[in-house]
Amino acid sequence: MSRMWNKLKAGDAARKVRPVRTVAAIFCALALALIPVGGSLHAGDARLVKIDQGGIGQASRSIVLGLNKAAIVELPVAARDVLVSNPAIVDAVVRTNKRTYLIGLAVGQTNAFFFNENGQQILNLEIRVARDLSGLRDSLRQYFPGTRIDVESINDHVVLSGMVSNASEASKAQDLAARYIGVDKDNVLNMLGIEGKEQVMLKVTVAEMQRSVIKQLGVDLSSAADFGDFALRLATSNSFSVQGGSLGGLTTAENPLDPTRYQSGDVTVDSAIRALERDGILRTLAEPNLTAISGESAKFLAGGEFPVPTSRDRDGNVQIEFKPFGVGLNFTPVVLSEGRISLKISTEVSELASDGAFVFQGSDGSGVTVPALKVRRAETTLELPSGGSLVMAGLLSDSTRQNIDGVPGAKDVPVLGQLFRSRDYQKNETELVVIVTPYLVDPTSRKNLVLPTDGYAPASDMDTILMGKLNATYGARGAAPGKETLQGPVGFVVD
């Protein structure tokens, strides 16, 4: 009886399991029928896909993390998984299931996801790692009081914006930022504006006086005597070694009718006397004016250029290059502060000279003389207030050259020795002064400017022929005819 009961219980259990297995098989068949072939979804089923990029949901937050600094994340529920998209930028240290430390390792952007044990998203954290510039802002306020400088970080670069007083402060602020964050100066973008004036006009006055004195005195003798069949001829030729030759003046020629000839029998003595005294003076005055923005260079040249042979081509033609000469000016201003200007100046006064000239011999025997340059040059860096003047270069030069050439022994005889020698004397005195004056200037209207040609009217033929006039009127623009004086302020008007 017991075995029969067990079999019945087993049969009943089998009958109960079969319907369950049948239902499970039906659901599996339906599931297989719903799965698309090849593992791809139909176009209508793409709406069932859910993608969470982060940063736009209710569980999204964003923070700015300082480089090499940490932040603590406290979660309201326990977290099972933590995902950081770029561990090279941010490192996540999980201390407990509700507390996580985030450490900024490199400058950049990344995000982190936090999930609970059911796989649900707890938090999506958008993280931007940047340099902490609060200390740099404090340093800029300390070293540049009264300025408005703002600092921002863009990736591994720093941007300076705001207003400063001058270009010098802007450059110093850029240097300070580069040294503070420990990067190259090129990684600091300087977008600072300048409040003060930046245009500098430099007025340079070049004044030079040259005085020269030349004295030449020489005696040349020639004698001839006949003693029977024996003839004796003596002659002295005293040159002027300083000048390289006689420059003119008083000269007695060797002429039979000249009273300087002495003849007695077979003895004839001729003499030639050359004497010269020359006084020369040269005055140079130039006042070049240039305007340049702070930090930029400006050049000026009032003169010309002369050709200099440099080489020959394969056909034998001479190649030339032009060299400048005259009054030149080159300067670079930097506005340090209101009223303080740093100037790097180079000025030059040059002129063509025969001393030191070079003769370029051609292949056909002809020669080309290349003149030399007599140059007075000064270059320096100085600091001046606006409107202040300073003598940049003051040159006093005094040179004396004197030679006495003559017959040995005879030229040393008192009184009569002058007949056997020549004297060449030269004295040069030069005085050069260069004065510089910078001004902070602003542009003005064209109608406020006056030209030297304003008010000029050429004379008529009748005025030129009868009165000898070259111009009819020459005065200020709008002045009445006949008034040949300039009215009002004339020249450069600066603040």
Image: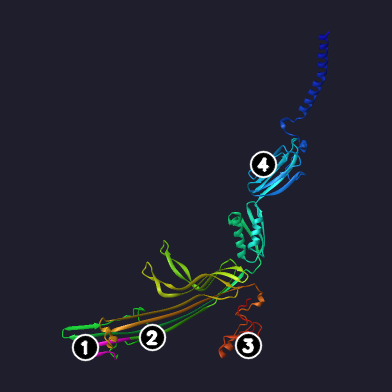
Q: Is mark 2 on a helix, strand or loop?
A: strand
* Lower sequence index among marks 1 and 3: 1
In which quadrant will I find the N terminus? Answer: top right
Residue 408 covered by magenta stretch: no
Residue 483 badge: 3
Counting from the top left corner in percent of width and height, residue 219 is at 30, 85
**Label 2 crowding class (10 Å Cα cut-off): few <14, some 14-19, many 20+?**
some
Q: Nearer the viewer, mark 4 or mark 2?
A: 4
Residue 271 covered by magenta stretch: yes
Residue 93 badge: 4
Counting from the top left corner in percent of width and height, residue 95 is at 69, 40
Q: Is mark 3 on a helix, strand or loop?
A: loop
Tell me how far mark 1 sits from mark 3, CA to CA: 77 Å
Q: Which of marks 3 and 2 is in front?
A: 2
Relative to 395, residue 41 above or below: above
Q: Give the range drawn in magenta.
A: 259-273
Side (left or right) of 360 relative to 150: left
